[in-house]
Image (cartoon, rainbow, N blue to C red):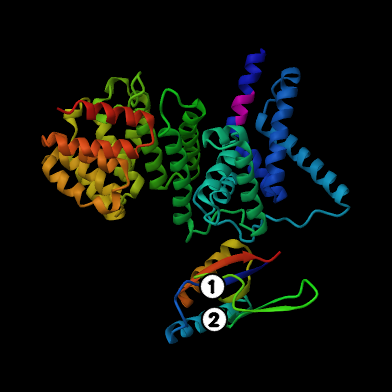
Amino acid sequence: MSAGDVGAAITRAHRDEWARVVAALARRFGDLDVAEEAAAEAFATAVERWPADGVPPNPGAWLTTTANRKAIDRIRRESKRDGKHREALVLSDNDPPEPLGVIEDERLRLIFTCCHPALAMESRMALTLRLVGGLTMPEIARAFLVPESTMGQRITRAKAKIKATRIPYRVPSAEDLPARVAGVLAVLFLVFNEGYLATGPGTDPVRHDLTTEAIRLTRLIRALLPADGEVAGLLALMLLTEARRGTRVSASGELVTLAEQDRGAWDAALVAEGHRLVRERLAAGVAPGRYQILAAINAVHTSARDVRDTDWSQVVALYDLLVRLDRSPIVALNRAIAVAELDGPEVALAAVDRLSGELAGYHAYHATRADLLRRLGRGGQSRAAYDAAIELAGNSAEIAYLTRRRDQLV
Amino acid sequence: MQYLLTVIDDGTGPDTPTEEAAIDVFNERLRAEGHWVFAGGLGAPDSATVVDNRRDEAVFTDGPFVESKEYLAGFWIIEAADLDVALKLATDGSKACNRKVEVRPFL
């Protein structure tokens, strides 16, 4: 076996087995620190040994056994040093697992613990990427644009809180499950957006990796909770968004709107997989949640070969459903953008103007108004709205786009 | 494991009879389910006296040690298997007393 093959085997084992190894150790030793460190040591040992000894026939079992040994070594060292035995298990699991209708997987416990609502959202994202995703601390720090020491403290603090407050290491009860799954999905969607919104030629490639990682983790949750419609919906939403990533920013670093994107360059395989998931949810005949509706909206867009073929009445109907679940002004703004295509810019502008109180500080509100005013031939007002949008926008690709549109006004 | 549930008043003022009745029901449930350790309501912050005897002579100061719009109005000490159980009880406690509740573990 060549060095390249061994390297590939280690990468594959890391991708496929990391979370399983950490989860199994966390369960056995009741300590996330021990689990994380022993798993990292086991992979380091693999890097050292596999090139000489060959890749073991069952890499996952080899890694788990090695990590177990490392954890026991560490616990022995510590109990010798401290002259006392380790405290009783800190990660508790008092109840028998609830029947979930799926194969009980240790990784689910790990995910629910990392995404516990008592932890700050930024800690949940960092812990999930480290303990479930297996990203290194420097990778996570770079992806969130914070110093490594800050990210290290964030993760250490979160693990300390899990221990001190006794956040349980288990799959939530059936009664709490929907809310807790929603919490996990919110974490993954934020991770995805963190990577997606950073899209741009000058952006650190690690940030693009966040979208890939978010998709991979959502696939994992889907494999573990196959009956959950919102899990399928979020995965479809991510896939249909990711499919367009390459066409979203021009060579010169300017944002390309959905209407102007080169549809032939969308990733056809991702679009097809996203459409399959949306169809599967439609066939299920269960009232869709937020992510399923957003996925369906994206499916309508990605079904049109040309922007002029877009079924806007379908898009507006889906937004009407979404508005019932989510009263946020941002949903209302996006609905208005679709309304402009169906009923014209004047109707849409009236709807957008009603949001002025809540969205005055949001760049997309001003950008939407600017575009609608432009289409209504109200150049002066449009220019002022573009100015406000540029002032508030943080993303360089978006600023470049808005500036060009403003300067094209006559 | 024991947790301290502190009741935070942010301008709600004294308990209403409805709140007191709801708190009684909640306390009964804590006892019935074996979570009860201790609980109490506290006088208003302006009834506080701060004592500092770290030097030669004890100094008494009238009023709370921090002036704040939010103050500790009362507390429960509960026994719970883990944080999920404690958070669930705090959720019901917050509803009963109509105030925010902070959950902290004892060491």
Give the percent coordinates (x, y) of residue A387.
26, 36
**Left or right: where does residue A239 sit relative to residue A389?**
right
Q: Residue furthest bottom?
A: B17
When asked about the image quadrant of residue A49, the answer is: top right
Relative height, residue A269 to residue A164 (above, below)? above
**Left or right: where does residue A38 sit relative to residue B44?**
right
Q: Residue at x 56, y 47 (%)?
A: A123
Q: Nearer the viewer, residue A89 or B58?
A: B58
Quarter in which the N terminus of chain A is drawn:
top right
Q: Residue at x 50, y 82 (%)?
A: B25
Q: Nearer the viewer, residue A134 or A221?
A: A134
Read off the chain for label 2.
Answer: B
Nearest to N terminus: mark 2 or mark 1: 2
Identify which amino acid the numbered label 2 is placed on.
Answer: Ala
- Is the residue at mark 2 from the same chain as the one at mark 1? yes
Read off the chain for label 1.
Answer: B
Q: Is residue A62 visible?
A: no
Q: Any magenta on residue A171?
A: no
Q: Which region is colored magenta? A: A10-14
Identify which amino acid the numbered label 1 is placed on.
Answer: Tyr
Badge 1, how many Cα within 10 Å: few under 14, some, many 20+? some
Find out whether the residues at labels 2 and 1 contact each other: C-beta distance under 8 Å: yes
Q: Any magenta on residue A11?
A: yes
Magenta stretch, main secondary structure, is helix
Q: Residue at x 32, y 49 (%)?
A: A288
Which residue is under mark 1? B71
When asked about the image quadrant of residue A152, the answer is: top right
Which residue is under mark 2? B44
Q: At numbered mark 1, what does the secondary structure look like: helix, strand or loop?
A: strand
Relative height, residue B92 to residue A220 (above, below)? below
Q: At numbered mark 2, what does the secondary structure look like: helix, strand or loop?
A: loop
